[in-house]
Image (cartoon, rainbow, N blue to C red):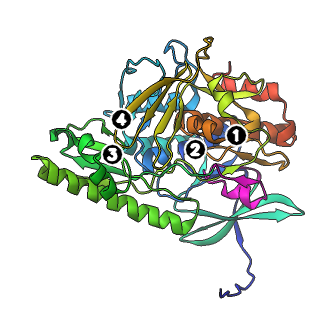
């Protein structure tokens, strides 16, 4: 392997803030907004041209219920609910679907269908209204340390290579880039859940049985995986949002991510070819959009102060340091294996690539929880005094990750990270020693539900 030596150079400090957030998904934006609303000076860095991450740039346009599995007790509020209310106020910004009746009574089915383009605008507004300094089309490059302590991050964009100094840092990159560069233990769950390319297709509603067509063995081989889901775009009569193609690989690696993007788009074209060949109305299909980035379910995790387990989720373990709640089931997509949905009330569903469904009981003892909890320790590094982690790279085992990875749960980890950094900033404590009661009080006053 050949190397070149880059000459040393001075790097201009373009901003000096209290808190810098790396990653502008909803999780990252919510971290920044919560800290800024409390009074912190905040900057946020996002590689794409719009905020929202998977929700907007990957076309994963659904958020699940804000309640427990009874649909009677609200367990999620904060900026997730605020965004829902903002989109409600925009014409065709949101469609609400009543919970789908099913024997598991779990809020697995989408409740809120998002107009992702309107959400981009609302996230912009949220950032600007909070006084946050945004950096779009900007990539995190490296940490900068002084005497072993994280003091700044190096970023790059069209204008050059710069540094942002801060007192506290939030890694919302989803792939844990800052945490990994700071020496945090990085681990994988083994066979990674596949990534999915989003697409917008007009004419879908005229087809007869498209999922059955796509799930035949021959057609599954042509597209390289299983057919996923689709849902109508709010405010349109004939545009469907597809999340169907699947690519298996570690998309935290740049070369693999490149292949994933290209393969995902190929699969969209192949699916449309199959439908055009197999259905009399297939020729009327029109591809009107491809997601700017592939939607990633899983890459690597960062070892924090506590690993959430599948048992914690499924048995609703109580945590004294809980900072978020959810009722989404354990939802694990393993390549070439049945997709598993494990619900809190003892039912488990296996969905095969061909569309066959098997329903079994995984638990018979009763006394089922109606929601599960996210502990603060799972987003808190053990020893780095000024770094928080949020998003899908938080510390969790395979089954727990299958439940945690959805946006309505991860959004709450962002809000907690932002408030924790503000608490440390104003108290002068390291993050590992903040006044937890004061922190939780700020969470409540900011709109979060703390049970």
Mark 1 to mark 4: distance in Å? 41 Å
Q: Quadrant of the C terminus?
A: top right
Marks 1 & 4, CB-CB < 8 Å contact: no
Q: Can residue 140 be seen by looking at this rendering?
A: yes
**Which mark sits nearer the N-terminus, 3 or 2?**
2
Circle 2 Cα neighbour tier, 10 Å, few/some/many (<14 / 14–19 / ≥20): many
Q: Secondary structure at mark 1?
A: helix
**Which mark sits nearer the N-terminus, 4 or 3?**
3
Q: Residue at x 52, y 48 (%)?
A: 193
Q: Secondary structure at mark 2?
A: helix
Q: Secondary structure at mark 4?
A: loop
User: x, y (%) of residue 4?
Assistant: 67, 88
User: x, y (%) of residue 44?
Assistant: 61, 52
* Residue pointed to by mark 4: 356
User: x, y (%) of residue 137?
Assistant: 52, 62
Q: Residue at x 46, y 50 (%)?
A: 295
* Residue pointed to by mark 3: 242
Task: Classify 446 as above or below 231.
Answer: above
* Residue pointed to by mark 1: 417
Q: Which mark is residue 29?
A: 2
Q: Nearer the viewer, mark 1 or mark 3?
A: 3
Quadrant in the rendering for residue 399: top right
**Image: magenta residue range:** 167-189
Circle 4 Cα neighbour tier, 10 Å, few/some/many (<14 / 14–19 / ≥20): few
């Amino acid at each position: 392997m050949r190397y070149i030596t880059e000459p040393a150079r001075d790097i201009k400090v373009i901003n000096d803030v209290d808190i810098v957030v790396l990653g502008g998904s909803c999780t990252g934006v919510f971290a920044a907004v919560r800290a800024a609303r409390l009074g912190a000076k905040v900057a946020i860095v996002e590689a794409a041209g719009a905020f929202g991450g998977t929700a907007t740039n990957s076309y994963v346009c659904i958020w699940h219920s804000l309640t427990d599995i009874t649909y009677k007790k609200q367990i999620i509020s904060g900026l997730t609910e605020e965004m829902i209310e903002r989109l409600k106020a925009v014409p065709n910004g949101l469609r609400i679907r009543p919970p789908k009746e099913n024997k598991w009574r779990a809020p697995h089915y989408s409740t809120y269908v998002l107009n992702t383009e309107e959400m981009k605008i609302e996230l912009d507004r949220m950032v600007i209204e909070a006084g946050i300094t945004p950096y779009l089309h900007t990539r995190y490059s490296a940490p900068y340390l002084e005497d072993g302590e994280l003091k700044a991050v190096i970023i790059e964009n069209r204008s050059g290579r710069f540094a942002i100094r801060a007192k506290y840092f939030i890694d919302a990159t989803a792939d844990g880039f800052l945490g990994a560069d700071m020496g945090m233990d990085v681990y994988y769950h083994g066979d990674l859940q596949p990534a999915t390319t989003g697409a917008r297709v007009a004419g879908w509603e005229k087809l007869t049985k498209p999922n059955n067509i796509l799930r035949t063995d021959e057609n599954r081989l042509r597209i390289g995986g299983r057919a996923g889901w689709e849902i109508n775009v709010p405010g349109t009569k004939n545009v469907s949002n597809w999340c169907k193609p699947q690519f298996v690989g570690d998309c935290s690696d740049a070369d693999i991510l490149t292949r994933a993007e290209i393969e995902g788009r190929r699969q969209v074209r192949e699916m449309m070819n199959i439908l055009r060949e197999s259905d009399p109305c297939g020729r009327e299909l029109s591809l009107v959009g491809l997601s700017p980035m592939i939607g990633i379910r899983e890459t690597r995790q960062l070892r924090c102060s506590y690993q959430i387990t599948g048992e914690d989720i499924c048995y609703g373990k109580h945590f004294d340091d809980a900072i978020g709640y959810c009722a989404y089931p354990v939802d694990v997509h393993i390549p070439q294996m049945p997709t598993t949905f494990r619900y809190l009330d003892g039912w488990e569903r296996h969905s095969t690539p061909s569309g066959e469904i098997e329903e079994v009981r995984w638990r018979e003892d009763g006394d089922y929880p109606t929601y599960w909890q996210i502990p603060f320790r799972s987003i808190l590094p053990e020893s780095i005094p000024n770094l928080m982690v949020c998003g899908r790279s938080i510390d969790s085992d395979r089954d727990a990750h299958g439940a945690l990875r959805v946006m309505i749960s991860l959004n709450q980890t962002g809000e907690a990270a932002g408030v924790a950094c503000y608490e440390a900033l104003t108290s002068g404590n390291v993050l590992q020693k903040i006044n937890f009661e004061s922190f939780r009080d700020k969470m409540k006053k900011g709109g979060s539900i703390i049970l």
